[in-house]
Amino acid sequence: MKKMEEVLQDWEAVIGLEVHCELTKLETKMFCGCKLEFGAEPNTHTCPVCLGMPGALPVPNRAAIENIVLAGLATNCDIEKHTMFYRKGYMYPDMAKNFQTTQGPKAFCMRGWLDLAVDGRGAEERLFWKDLGEGETSENITRTDAGYIAHVGITRIHMEEDAGKMIHVGGGEGRIAGATHSLVDYNRAGTPLIELVTEPDLRTPEEARLFMQKLRQIFLTLGISDCSMEEGSLRADGNVSLRRRGTCEFGTKTELKNINSFKNLHDGLAYEICRQAEVLEEGGQIYQETRHWDPSKKRTIVMRVKETADDYRMFPDPDLAPYDLSDEFIERVRAKLPELPDQRAQRYVDELGLSAYDARHLVDHRFTIDFFEAAVAAAGDRARELAKPLANLALNDITAYVNAGEGIDFATTAFTPERGVQLVELVAADEISSKQAKEVFAAVLEEDKDPQAIVEERGMKQVSDTGAIEAVVTQVLADNPDKVEQYKGGKTGLIGFFVGQCMKAMAGQGNPKLINELLAKKLG
Ligand code: ADP
Ligand code: ZN
Ligand code: MG
């Protein structure tokens, strides 16, 4: 198979996502009072409603609808005031009702959007954005200082309910094939889920990954879900098709089901793009089918040929009245919206003077937000001055540290925000160089001591005494008259040599900025 970069020269990928998110912060299920509890004894949280007993009547969970409206407002959706619940045919023992209650053509949230900032290596997957001038827009992207912003439409966000859980026993390693019997646990049946569907506006696997990441940050900020991709409370289906560059019509798509990590979403889509290109280039045809991404084998396999909407036999649920949301209710929910990641980033720009680039990357991850917010608070009056070095600390050193140790909770390490402020103050005061700061950062984590103490113990203090440095500079120049001649004759690259000699004479502790300044003065 060809590499994706090569494929994307000739083909354009069209990607749309369907994201499922369990509303894990709720107390009770969608249509009954049963408790939502992960890992409880099987079938202890059930009742006639979620077991689908004849005559049992569902009652919508107001708190769940509030969560869904919050999600819609946070993603720029219109809130639909008159909606209905629908029944979607579903015939499998893990859902005793034999249908799933969901929403029809009108969902609670319609026509939203999110803007994705794509830069760095991730931007390389998209072609042609570099032809745009900064601020210039073409199709759904706008060029920025470091990449581009992709405007991604959200078709809708609607309510769904989860099914129970089947356990296959008696052989076959938990799979149904080879099992002698199956057990079913209805604790999860009726758990409220939201499904968010995007427009087919994404063009690269990286954009799909960033969309998921951004959505996760928003849902976490709203506090509506724990959004754990490992535990399955957040998962995505990736739809992808190809079309020849320069053509408009969409090709036939395939759907990758139940993707459970950002990496799998990216890699699964990238594989599928390459597979489809190969089929098409050999004159074959893409079938609309559901496929499964197997990350260990690095390939996708067919799960089933796609059902059409007719197969679900959707119709309004006669047990549930049309559901109307009042303006008052919507406004009450709007008042509960917390500061969202994009707003937070804008505040960092406006109030702390950060660059847009730094600000939007700080809000990408919870640990960088938490560190930065606490450090800025600890910096007090000095917050604006120290914001840039604190942002660098969070985006470079801390990010590298967290990425190297999987699953590390940075807030529990010895490098507290207060120590972060102390470290950047040492650099700002020219007491240590930024190179030494990296060593101090590692030492704080290892030894659980203040940066100040480490600098003293290791005798790292940088010499910033102008008199002392001047003496060294004078000596170095006197020792190398030939080099000074050459420098004056135009070999200005020799400056590095002089700085190196001065540093050596000062055992690495001279302030490089001062050395450079003094050398320039004496040589110039
Ligand atoms: P289906 O009826 O197969 O469920 P939908 O129209 O509901 O398809 O779309 C499901 C998802 O697939 C949406 O995210 C949508 O943006 C995306 N999608 C639709 N058509 C295409 C296509 N041709 N290529 C890629 N994605 C698509
Ligand atoms: Zn129940
Ligand atoms: Mg669909």
Image (cartoon, rainbow, N blue to C red):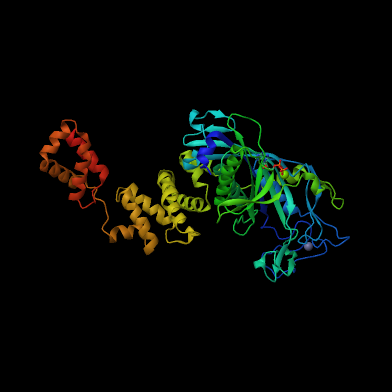
Q: Can residue 483 be seen in this snapshot? A: yes
Q: Residue at x 67, y 70 (%)?
A: 171
Foreground pick, 473 / 88? 88
Q: Quadrant of the C terminus?
A: top left
**Total marks in image:** 0
Taking the image in four quarters, ligand 3 sits in the one at top right
Residue 522, horizontal then vertical, whole percent: 17, 36
User: Is 106 situated left or right of 116 in this image?
Assistant: right
Foreground pick, 443 / 490? 490
Foreground pick, 59 / 353? 59
User: Is 292 situated left or right of 88 in this image?
Assistant: left
The answer to whether 248 is drawn above or below residue 263 in the figure is: above
Foreground pick, 349 / 492? 492
Residue 98, horizontal then vertical, whole percent: 81, 57
Residue 49, horizontal then vertical, whole percent: 82, 61
Q: Residue furthest front?
A: 282
User: Is 115 situated left or right of 38 in this image?
Assistant: left
Q: Residue furthest right?
A: 55
User: Is 87 situated left or right of 340 in this image?
Assistant: right
The answer to whether 167 is drawn above or below residue 370 in the figure is: below
Residue 338, horizontal then vertical, whole percent: 61, 48
Q: Can residue 325 be seen in this snapshot? A: no
